[in-house]
Image (cartoon, rainbow, N blue to C red):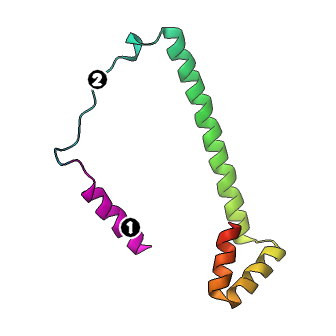
Amino acid sequence: MAVAVVAAGAATLILRPRSGLIEPAAVDAAAYFSKAQLDRASEFRDVQRLIGLGGLAVSGGTLALLALRPPRRVAELLERAGRRPVAGGAMVGAGL
């Protein structure tokens, strides 16, 4: 895990633009879209945000439930995988 963090940090420094960061141009959305289109986009964004938060809550709850109380079959399979760490780790990874 530490190697991945160090590699990501090094890549960030190496791949950074040499001339510095480029400031984005100021753009007025009303110059390109009508008021109705902007209102529709805002409504769509609000609903999508709620759907995303709901999905995150369901995923987190499911993960917590499986971590705290794994089904008996899953616990047995993980125990069997633990007897042979390399092969078991490969099988668990493939299963995920």
Distance in Å between CA atoms under marks 1 and 2: 34 Å
Q: Is residue 41 left or right of residue 28?
A: right
Queried whether the magenta region covers residue 88, the answer comes back as no
The relative height of residue 48 versus residue 26 in the rendered view (above or below) is below
Q: Which residue is mark 2?
A: 26
Residue at horizontal 22 percent and vertical 42 percent from the top: 21
Task: Identify the element where label 2 is drawn.
Answer: loop
Q: Residue furthest left?
A: 19
> Which amino acid type is shown beneath numbered disc 1?
Val
Crowding near the residue tagged with mark 2, few <14, some 14–19, many ≥20 C-alpha atoms within 10 Å: few
Q: Quadrant of the C terminus?
A: bottom right
Bounds of the magenta span? 1-17
Task: Tell me the tag on residue 87.
Answer: none
Seen from the viewer's position, the closer of residues 24 and 43 is 24
The relative height of residue 29 versus residue 74 in the rendered view (above or below) is above
The relative height of residue 87 versus residue 34 in the rendered view (above or below) is below
Q: Which residue is mark 1?
A: 5
Q: Quadrant of the N terminus?
A: bottom left
Please state the horizontal and vertical placement of residue 80, each as a whole percent of the image.
75, 86
Please state the horizontal and vertical placement of residue 61, each as a whole percent of the image.
69, 57
Q: Write down the quadrant of residue 77 in the picture.
A: bottom right
